[in-house]
Amino acid sequence: MPIRVHLDRVLLERRMSLTELADRVGVTIANLSILKTGKARAIRFSTLDALCRELGCQPGDIVTFEPGPPDDPDGGED
């Protein structure tokens, strides 16, 4: 998918753990981990708002668009 998530970089820059962020935004560690690893297929605006508020950043600091072919959602098998 050409949308990339940079949550790990932002957390490192803020010296914040995933556990601390989860507590602050009210999202489970498991869900943040899915987002952080780029396996999430969607994110709610309310979650993005809470992440930006707690991390002191803009949405573009967390997610970016990188042009290229879209990932095959079926894993490439025909």
Image (cartoon, rainbow, N blue to C red):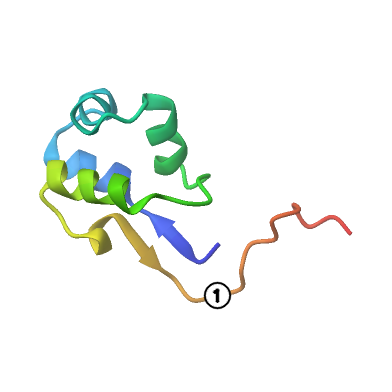
Q: In which quarter of the image is residue 58?
A: bottom left
Label total for image:
1
* In front of the other: 9 or 53: 53
Image position of 30 with respect to 7: above or below: above
Of all residues, the one furthest to the right in this rendering is 78
Residue under label 1: 68
As helix, strand or loop, the secondary structure at mark 1 comes to loop
Q: In which quarter of the image is the N terminus?
A: bottom right
Give residue 77's position: percent from left, percent from top.
Answer: 84, 55
Task: Identify the residue at horizontal 42%, vertical 42% (top origin).
Answer: 35
Task: Identify the residue at horizontal 61%, vertical 68% (top origin).
Answer: 70
Give residue 31's position: percent from left, percent from top.
Answer: 43, 33
Q: Quadrant of the C terminus?
A: bottom right
Image position of 61 with respect to 10: above or below: below
How many residues crowd mark 1 within 10 Å: few (<14), some (14–19), many (20+)?
A: few
Give residue 57's position: percent from left, percent from top.
Answer: 14, 54
From the viewer's perspective, tell me whether residue 24 is left or right of residue 27: left
Q: What residue type is labelled 1?
A: Gly
Q: Quadrant of residue 60?
A: bottom left
Image position of 25 with respect to 55: above or below: above
Give residue 41's position: percent from left, percent from top.
Answer: 53, 51
Of all residues, the one furthest to the front in this rendering is 46
Task: Identify the residue at horizontal 23%, vertical 44% (top origin).
Answer: 51
